Amino acid sequence: MSNSILSFKTAYLQAVAKSWEDEVFAKEFHEKGEENILTFLEQHSGSPKDFISPWENLVINFLDDESHTLYWDPIQTGRWVGNDDRLTIFLPEDPGLDNRVEGLAQYNFIFPSFMGKVKSDMQLLFNDKEQIEFIDYLVSKGIKIPTILTLGETDMDLLSFSAVMLRTIALYWDDPCFKEEILNADGDHSDKAPVLSKFFGFSNPWNFAINFKECKTFILNKDDDSEFDYPANVISLGKPRKPQVPEGVKGAQGIYPIALAAYNDDGKSYPFTCC
């Protein structure tokens, strides 16, 4: 598991645990988490250290559909139960036949994995103003800027999907029938992993549905590699509700730790939720 995912899961698990003990916090966590859990964690973390989102082009939020709520079932299944999470990927506009090779290369630079690039050490250590001041200071002193401060690392365990993404985009630009089949219309959240399997032999290793959305403003310009102009992919999670105490068990003191441990008992198919 990459350090970026681990840092998120650590802060996220702390928030989940607190939401089971504090109803006011739980309400805010669930409501604001429907917009962006990463932003919420940046504002509410602090133990053992402040959380800073490591991704440049990623939103992680809660699904607002109650049918996606997760609940702990220690009796019948012995695990957390709920519908799959969802990954929404925004596809870029066709840059034109003559520019498709450069366009794909630029897309791969922006999204080496579907989570986007990981922020550089500079971005994690300093805010925007401090970054500019620090770079200006190094330049004024004639000090060469270390590459490690300006380049982010990639989530290596997610790179294999990027090859499928490049093939998907290339065919999306070239084949109108494939474009129609791969896109999710507004309100349609059907899983497109079977389409990827049909065309590319892709076997989805994660327990979430994959959605693709058209994005008219996602323009690949080979002369402008600014990440801030591009949409963020979205990982949407079910809300882990406070575990119910089984009949015959006194109190929740012994139940919550067991339920939290089960939620954190992740496998490769659950890289985002902890369950």
Image (spheres, helix red, strand yellow):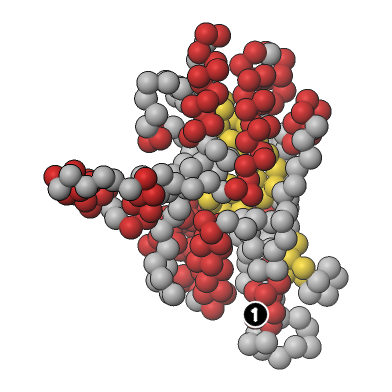
| In this rendering, position of residue 246 left or right of residue 40 | right
Question: In the rendered image, is residue 59 in sight?
Answer: no
Residue toward you, 114 or 33: 114
The amino acid sitting under disc 1 is Tyr
Label 1: state its secondary structure: helix
- Examine the rendered structure and indicate whether residue 113 appears above or below residue 15: above
Q: Quadrant of the C terminus?
A: bottom right
At which x and y percent is residue 30? Answer: 52, 60
Q: Residue furthest bottom?
A: 250
Q: Residue furthest top?
A: 98
Residue at the (70%, 68%) spot, across then down? 265
Residue at the (55%, 9%) spot, across then down? 97
- Examine the rendered structure and indicate whether residue 64 appears above or below residue 29: above
Q: Which residue is mark 1?
A: 256
Answer few, some or many: residues within 10 Å of disc 1's Cα (few below 14, many 20 plus, some between 14 and 19): some
Question: In the rendered image, is residue 109 in sight?
Answer: yes
Residue at the (67%, 19%) spot, across then down? 171
At which x and y percent is residue 236? Answer: 59, 49
At which x and y percent is residue 96? Answer: 52, 10
Residue at the (54%, 31%) spot, across then down? 108
Residue toward you, 48 or 249: 48
